[in-house]
Image (cartoon, grey):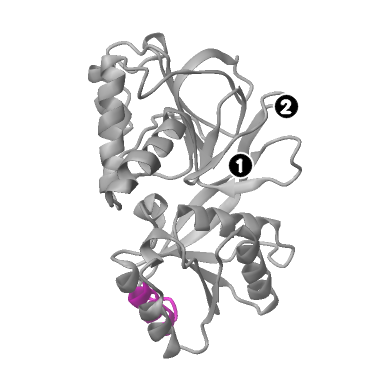
């Protein structure tokens, strides 16, 4: 395999510098290393890798960097099929890396990757994950990612950036504290912290869900931080969709199923909980959404936001 690496020096785990990464790669000159501070630079790096025949790309950045690389790969004509990906834990939270990333710290993950490449791929596990394609008319260019969220998910990201990151807390601690604060707010029905959002959600060909939604989550990952699996659909479809109504009943009793991905007698549609697997989700909403930690604000006067299956990627894990 020909390996290339894209590093974002602005990601949370790289802000202290890329010295250790550069030192490790200096002993492996066959590995192409490019830095990308924004999606445009990530697209240039991916296009160069395609021209050079690179068939495995390591991403040394956060969730937003992964999204930028995925989008560049699926829009790049030089890659008729996606290259292998390897994800280092280099972000502020690195939520995607919890599911598909290389084990250990940034340095440990890089060491594992280079050792595996030197051994011709021996010792790697290959994890396949579907990719979300997100279209926001009238923008003709889609984005590709792994975690989409709206309502409480979007509000949680804003709260975390505004209240938690400013305390210098990162890694699993930051989203865990945000989750705890939001769960308490839901239990207390505290609209100052978390508020329902008017929304219309159409999942495949099923009748649309229309009304105030407290939480909307769409992903293809199998686990999040703390081992959370907030989906329990049984349909044979690539995308996990979970929604919670504005006033969910028996919230504390349903919570274990929301966390473990197992339906219990409390987590039913009648009580305000909905989860299934799908191929396409259409959303009409007035609020913003997040895709891999990055915030977006679609114009509600335009057509619905569409989230569907954009393809499949394979991740190297070791």
Specify whether residue 145 is painted magenta. Answer: no
Apparent side of residue 262 relative to residue 87 in the rendered image (left or right)? left
Part of the protein shown in magenta? 110-122
Apparent side of residue 272 relative to residue 265 in the rendered image (left or right)? right
User: Circle 2 sits in a helix, a strand or a loop, which is it?
Assistant: loop
Residue 301: percent from left, percent from top: 72, 23
In the rendered view, tell whether residue 30 sits above or below residue 68.
below
From the image, tell me which residue sits under label 2. 303
* Mark 2, other Cα within 10 Å: few <14 / some 14–19 / many ≥20: some
From the image, tell me which residue sits under label 1. 309
Q: Does residue 227 appear in the picture of this structure? A: no
The mark that comes first in sequence, 1 or 2, is 2
Q: Does residue 101 appear in the picture of this structure? A: yes
Q: Which mark is residue 125?
A: none
- The Cα–Cα distance between marks 1 and 2, rounded to whole angstroms, is 19 Å
Identified at 36% across, 52% down, the residue is 93
Identified at 66% across, 56% down, the residue is 74
Camera-side residue of 10 and 309: 10
Residue 310: percent from left, percent from top: 63, 46
């Amino acid at each position: 395999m020909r390996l290339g690496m894209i590093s974002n020096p602005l990601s949370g785990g790289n802000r202290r510098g890329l010295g250790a990464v550069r030192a490790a790669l200096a002993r492996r000159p066959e590995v192409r290393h490019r830095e990308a501070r924004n999606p445009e630079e990530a697209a240039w790096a991916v296009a160069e890798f395609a021209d050079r025949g690179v068939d495995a790309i390591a991403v040394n950045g956060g969730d937003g960097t992964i999204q930028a690389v995925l989008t560049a790969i699926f829009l790049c004509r030089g890659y008729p099929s996606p290259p292998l990906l390897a994800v280092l834990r280099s972000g502020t939270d690195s939520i995607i890396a919890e599911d598909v990333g290389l084990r250990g710290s940034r340095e440990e993950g890089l060491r594992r990757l280079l050792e595996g490449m030197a051994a011709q791929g021996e010792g790697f596990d290959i994890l396949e994950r579907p990719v979300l394609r997100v279209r926001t008319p009238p923008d003709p260019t889609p984005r590709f990612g792994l975690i989409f969220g709206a309502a409480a998910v979007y509000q949680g990201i804003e709260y975390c950036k505004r209240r938690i990151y400013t305390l210098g807390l990162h890694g699993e601690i930051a989203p865990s504290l945000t989750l705890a604060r939001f769960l308490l707010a839901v239990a207390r029905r505290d609209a100052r912290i978390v508020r329902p959002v008017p929304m219309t959600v159409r999942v495949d060909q099923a009748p649309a869900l229309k009304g105030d939604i407290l939480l909307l989550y769409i992903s293809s990952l199998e686990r999040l931080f703390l081992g959370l699996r907030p989906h329990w659909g049984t349909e044979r479809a690539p995308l996990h969709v979970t929604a919670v109504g504005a006033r969910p009943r028996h919230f504390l009793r349903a919570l274990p199923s929301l966390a473990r991905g197992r339906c219990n007698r409390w987590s039913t549609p009648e009580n305000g909980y909905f989860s299934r697997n799908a191929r396409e989700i259409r959303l009409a909403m007035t609020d913003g959404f997040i895709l891999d930690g990055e915030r977006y604000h679609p114009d509600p006067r335009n057509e619905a936001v569409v989230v569907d299956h954009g393809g499949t990627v394979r991740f190297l894990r070791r």
